[in-house]
Image (cartoon, rainbow, N blue to C red):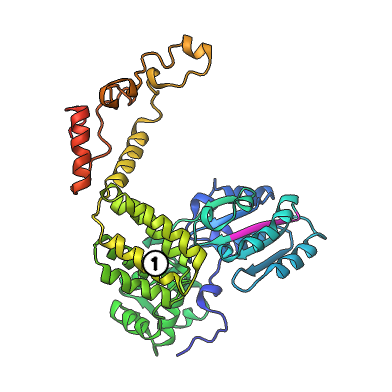
Amino acid sequence: MLLNSSQPLAERMRPSKLDELVGQEHLTGKNGVIRKAIQHGNIPSMILWGPPGVGKTTIANIIANEINKPFYTISAINAGVKDIREIIDKAKLSPRSILFIDEIHRFNKGQQDALLGAVEKGTITLIGATTENPSFEVNSALLSRCQVYTLRPLGEDQLLELVGQALQRDPQLKERKVVVKEHQALLNISGGDGRKLLNLVELICDSTDGDVVITDSLVMEIAQKHIAIYDKSGEQHYDIISAFIKSIRGSDPNAAVYYLARMIEGGEDVKFIARRMVILASEDIGNANPTALVMATTTFQAVNVIGYPEARIILSQCAVYLATSPKSNASYMAIESALGAIKQTGDLPVPLSIRNAPTRLMKQLDYGKGYQYAHSYEGNFVAMEFLPDGLQGTKFYDPGTNPREEELRKYLRLRWKEKYGY
């Protein structure tokens, strides 16, 4: 029984006011920066960065509803420099017109450069939406002219709130008796994507006659018949890259190459795949095999020059190398431990002996006094105290149990004796 509407449920339920938005309270709540910008009528150019279905487009639409300015919207998938210039020409008649660009990370450098002058002069206020890290995907000149706001994934309670609102408020769903008996499959398949969740609910209702009782088994049965195997813009994008990374982490080159092939066949961006391998090389291999980071970085550079189809060979070589490398997350754990200590202890004073002393006054205040230059001592080592008071003897880096880091452990134990418990 199809619901009689030309608009998907997610579009029918799209909020038009901030108070209707579910999630992103840190940006749109009482003290949120975007709420304050709307209240003051002073909208900065911004990049909204976050996973699919968490409210990026919705926030742009709400700004358009609240601010009495012309609003233009384009998608980077099918728009070019000509489209941008046409909008800029129109915006010159009404400065501070708002231009929303969905998936701005898909614009190349030339397309992004076409926005620079208009953003800088205030001809347009740019709102870009991206699922990719803007530090990598938006050129630095444009990025420097925008505020970057990070949108958070929706939690379980927020996702269920979306479903509840749809069942209560959507005119067409209200005509049906729809009961959510079980919700885990809904949440698992939607993966935190609110738009995908609502469209999945609609799909289940469209596929069921009479009253609807949503159970996990019903969701899985219907979803498996209708959901695409791989869609780089949403469906299993994050599931496949997760499986790829976990296969490499688990030292299975066969599974790693299989999931790599899934992404290649689906037309995944080579930079997206290569960048994830650069991160993994440090997070999961680290000093167990430092060459892994060199290999992954070189792969990232190479595939950007080569492109498909040849890039598939380079990606495969790197994936196999990383999967067959010894593993260690010791460096990752070290920085997480240090960050945790800073949150607990705050900004402790740096010991005077290792402070910089570029001026006479600083030297008079004993900055740098007592510093011992390691190269002046046997073995290029001297047992000084480098950590602030209160953290002396704290071990953040604990070498992994692999041959290379066992050698590092011996080296540290020889130098520091019992101080750090190596």
User: Furthest residue to the right?
Assistant: 93
The residue under the point 55% across, 84% down is 5
Residue type at numbered disc 1: Leu
**Residue 110: quarter of image:** bottom right
What is the x, y in percent for residue 119? 70, 54
Is residue 145 toward the left or the right of residue 217 in the image?
right
179 w.r.t. 126: above or below: below
Q: Main secondary structure of the magenta part?
A: strand
Query: What residue is disc 1 on?
Result: 315
Mark 1 burial class by Cα count in 10 Å: few <14, some 14-19, many 20+:
many
Q: Left or right of 240: which side holds 418?
A: left
Looking at the picture, does residue 128 appear above or below residue 172? above
- In this rendering, the answer to whether 187 lies above or below 151 is below
The residue lying toward the viewer, choosing from 357 and 7, is 357
Q: Secondary structure at mark 1?
A: helix
Q: Quadrant of the N terminus?
A: bottom left
Residue sitting nearer the eye, 175 or 144: 144
**Highlighted magenta segment, given as a residue range:** 123-128
Q: Position of residue 24 (x, y in %)?
A: 49, 55
- Residue at the location (38% across, 18% down)? 353
Residue 205 in magenta stretch:
no
The answer to whether residue 332 is seen in the rendering is: yes
Front residue (pair 181, 233): 233
Q: Quadrant of the C terminus?
A: top left
Q: Is residue 167 visible from the viewing direction of this image?
A: no
- Percent across and percent down for residue 363 are 47, 12
Residue 407, image x and y in percent?
Answer: 20, 41
Which residue sits furthest top? Answer: 364
